[in-house]
Image (cartoon, grey):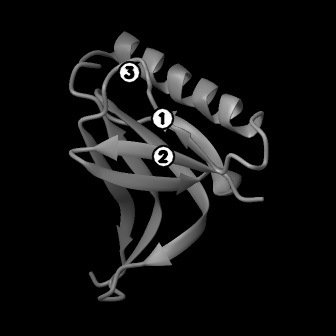
């Protein structure tokens, strides 16, 4: 059974498949990167999606970004321990999420 982290942002939902997560790492301040072992392509075919970038503008320094990363890792662990009948787990990290973006590599250059 595939499980997903469910992110709610501005009345829209984003799903991140947990089973495909390779790692979680600190990006730039305020950002945590969730890297995936499954890549996808944009409609133009000019880039490849490698993961997701989660932004929390209130996690404005290195210590807060690390706390955010730890809370996301704990959410992944909690999601994986839920019953198979609960395929989605609402991600509510320590600092409120203010942005979700795809991490991409451009191939058109």
In percent of the image, x 34 and y 20: which residue is there?
95
User: Element under label 3?
Assistant: helix
In percent of the image, x 70 and y 54: which residue is there?
19
Please state, as top left, top right, bottom left or bottom right, where the C terminus lies in the image.
bottom left
- Real-space Cα distance between discs 2 and 3? 20 Å
| Vertical order, 93 against 36 (above or below) | above
Are dots 2 and 1 in contact, CB under 8 Å?
yes
Circle 2 residue: 6
In percent of the image, x 49 and y 26: which residue is there?
69
Which x, y percent locates residue 71? 52, 21
Nearest to the eye among marks 1 and 3: give it. 1
Please state, as top left, top right, bottom left or bottom right, where the N terminus lies in the image.
bottom right
- Real-space Cα distance between discs 1 and 3? 16 Å
| Vertical order, 87 against 37 (above or below) | above
In percent of the image, x 46 and y 15: which residue is there?
67
> Earlier along the polypeptide chain: callout 2 or callout 1?
2
Circle 1 residue: 91
């Amino acid at each position: 059974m595939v499980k997903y982290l469910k992110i709610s942002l501005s009345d829209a939902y984003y799903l991140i498949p947990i089973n495909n997560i390779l790692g979680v790492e600190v990006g730039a301040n305020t950002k945590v990167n969730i890297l995936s072992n499954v890549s996808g392509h944009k409609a133009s075919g000019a880039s490849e999606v490698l993961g997701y970038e989660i932004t929390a503008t209130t996690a404005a320094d290195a210590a807060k970004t690390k706390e955010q990363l730890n809370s996301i890792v704990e959410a992944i662990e909690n999601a994986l321990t839920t019953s198979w009948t609960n395929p989605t787990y609402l991600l509510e990290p320590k600092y409120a999420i203010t942005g979700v973006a795809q991490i991409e590599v451009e191939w058109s250059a």
